[in-house]
């Protein structure tokens, strides 16, 4: 996507609900950006305590514009993102979850990737450092998205990064539509699938995003919402698209999504459900990666899952 000769305005949307202790760091990381044209929109999704008073000590003078919006009722993360998109004015729109934060150079470097890429690039992914609540590094995620990535996202071979990790050209959002408000989880994955049908992707591999893994991460951990709402809705919306790439890709899409659902069951202690779900994933595609490993872990219940989880964290830290 082409940009203007002047430094383009970049809008940053932060949806938030009830986590002011983390939100302060997220907002400050936007204020600290080295890029000169940044607009910040904080959308308070009707937190129990309004977030604006928690931000009074932060100066927004260096930003092109700043706005704090409060929903009259709780409407969910994607509704908050949509509100932010509608209020934003930037040529590019970036998103930052309220418990994550950015390196000061993120916006500057992402804009450079856009400007150095071809005109068909409409989304730029950024590398991520993962930390726990104490700031201890658990690992890194290096994005691999490049060019046309729709089939790779559907097959699970291209990482569909969380909202804090990608920036979108305004024209692509206009063509695609906003994130789907019906989804209680997997919101980023669903939007990536649609965005990727409208543009090419590029990646900034350096870890300029810091993602906190916290005990408050309820959206990610809500297995029932994934099983009852997100899983059937994603299959309904995107199985036809996967089928356009062939039967093998359709089977892999269903198997990968089912595998992800099974891992959510495993993480939440639904071990018998996880076993059944991993079995279904294998039925859809016997070659789906990691399914047999997860199935073996689930068969042992907490006696195998908890040690495996601890080993995985140690491996992430050692290779990060």
Image (tube, rainbow, N blue to C red):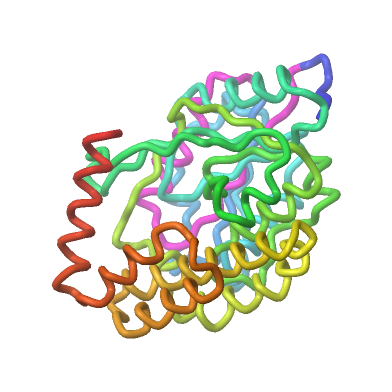
- Give the image location of residue 177, x and y in percent: 79, 56
Query: Is residue 205 visible to us here?
Result: yes
Asked if 96 appears above or below 82 in the picture, the reply is above
- Against 156, is 107 above or below? above
Q: Is residue 23 magenta?
A: yes
Residue in the picture at 71% in, 34% down: 147
Residue under the point 63% across and 19% down: 36
Residue lying at the far top in this picture: please name it: 5
Q: Is residue 20 above or below residue 127?
A: below
Q: Position of residue 257 (x, y in %)?
A: 54, 67
List x then y, in percent, for residue 83.
69, 57
Q: Quadrant of the C terminus?
A: top left
Q: Nearer the viewer, residue 110 or 250?
A: 250
In the rendered structure, the answer to whether residue 274 lies left or right of residue 245 reads: left
Q: Magenta residues, as a range?
A: 7-36
Residue at the (58%, 74%) spot, across then down: 230
Q: Is residue 10 above or below residue 315?
A: above
Residue in the foreground of this view, choosing between 98 and 70: 98
């Amino acid at each position: 996507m082409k940009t203007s000769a002047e430094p383009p305005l970049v809008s940053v949307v932060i949806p938030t609900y009830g986590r002011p202790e983390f939100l302060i760091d997220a907002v400050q990381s936007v204020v600290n950006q080295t890029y000169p044209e940044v607009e910040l929109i904080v959308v308070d999704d009707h937190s129990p305590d309004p977030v604006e008073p928690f931000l009074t000590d932060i100066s927004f003078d260096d930003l092109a514009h700043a706005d704090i919006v409060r929903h009259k009722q709780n409407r969910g993360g994607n509704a908050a993102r949509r509100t932010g998109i509608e209020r934003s004015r930037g040529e590019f729109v970036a998103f930052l979850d309220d418990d994550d934060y950015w390196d000061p150079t993120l916006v500057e470097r992402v804009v450079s990737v856009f400007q150095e890429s071809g005109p068909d690039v409409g989304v730029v992914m950024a590398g991520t450092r993962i930390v726990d609540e104490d700031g201890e590094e658990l690992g890194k995620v290096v994005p691999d998205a490049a060019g046309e990535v729709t089939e790779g996202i559907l097959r699970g071979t291209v990482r569909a990064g969380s909202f804090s990790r990608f920036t979108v050209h305004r024209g692509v959002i206009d063509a695609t539509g906003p994130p789907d408000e019906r989804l209680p989880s997997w919101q980023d994955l669903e939007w990536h699938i649609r965005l990727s049908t409208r543009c090419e992707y590029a990646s900034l591999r350096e870890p300029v995003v810091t993602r906190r893994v916290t005990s408050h991460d309820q959206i990610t951990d809500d297995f029932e919402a994934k099983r009852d709402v997100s899983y059937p809705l994603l299959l309904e919306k995107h199985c036809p698209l996967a089928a356009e790439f062939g039967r093998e890709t359709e089977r892999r899409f269903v198997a990968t999504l089912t595998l992800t659902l099974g891992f959510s069951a495993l993480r939440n202690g639904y071990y018998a459900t996880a076993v059944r779900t991993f079995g279904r994933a294998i039925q859809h595609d016997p070659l789906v990666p990691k399914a047999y490993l997860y199935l073996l872990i689930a068969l042992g219940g907490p006696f195998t899952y908890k040690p495996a989880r601890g080993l995985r964290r140690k491996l992430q830290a050692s290779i990060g």
